[in-house]
Amino acid sequence: MSPDELIGLFDELAAALLTRLDRQTDWGLTGTVPGQYEHDLVADELIVAPLLDAGLRVLTEESGISGTGDITVVVDPIDGSTNAARGLPWFATSLCAVDADGPVASAVYNLALGDRFAAIRGEGTEQSPSDCRELSDAIVAFSGWPTRHLGWRQYRTYGAAALDLCAVATGTFDAFIDVDAAHGVWDYLGAWLFCKESGCAIGELNDDELVVIETEPRRGPLVASTPELLADIKRSLAS
């Protein structure tokens, strides 16, 4: 499939999921896997089957790896499941197609507000981050909580990494910091490509590789509006 065709398929799946969630009545925990909600399973079931039917390999948070093919689609069926359960309008579906050269096409959809963040490798986006260069001037989105004040101007903790990362690419936040290195690849990879194509500076808490097509690794993505801000964040984390 071409990158444009992949994005088209992702759009169709997000639209179908929105329609299905309009009928969802049980937004509670499944009681089988810690932190897993009924709507996570509904979304996973709806998204995975069409991807497999299209001849794609799939990696998702809920059901692991399935299928075969030269392209793997990394999926977080619902990122920010707790927000969705509590009625907080900050939860998303994230899909990222990965070929032999890395992420090639991705889309992140805010299922509550309708925002769409799509990117194709090498094509850029219409978005651009802020020009913030110093942590003391930055509004930072966190996952986890640092053991001390790192020197930021203000902070937010919204609870959906994919949307938090995309918000750096649009200039809403100046940076995103995961201080726990607690994210699976499904949490951030779709937003990673959008941030990269939008011109953000991207790193990892422990300088580990972020593009890992496996279910077990956990990573700490760091995304900043400028290379200078990313360097300032790393200095503050290391000091």
Image (cartoon, rainbow, N blue to C red):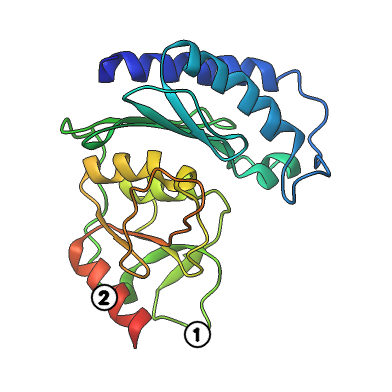
For the residue marked with disc 1, what is the amino acid?
Arg
Q: Position of residue 227 (x, y in %)?
A: 19, 63
What residue is pinned by disc 2?
232
Q: Could you tell me which quadrant the N terminus lies in?
A: top left
Q: Nearer the viewer, residue 70 or 1?
A: 70
- Residue lying at 22% horizontally and 40% vertically, measured from the top left: 197
- Residue lying at 63% horizontally and 27% vertically, measured from the top left: 43
Gap in Å between the C-alphas at discs 2 and 1? 16 Å
Q: Quadrant of residue 116?
A: top left
For the residue marked with disc 2, what is the amino acid?
Asp
Within 10 Å of disc 1 (Cα), the crowding (few <14, some 14-19, many 20+) is: few
Q: Quadrant of residue 6?
A: top left
Precedes in sequence: disc 2 or disc 1: 1
Q: Secondary structure at mark 1?
A: loop
What residue is pinned by disc 1?
148
Q: Could you tell me which quadrant the C terminus lies in?
A: bottom left
Q: Position of residue 75 (x, y in %)?
A: 49, 34
Q: Nearer the viewer, residue 35 or 200?
A: 35
Q: Can residue 105 be seen by looking at this rendering?
A: yes
- Residue lying at 37% horizontally and 79% vertically, measured from the top left: 237
Q: Is residue 22 above or below residue 117?
A: above
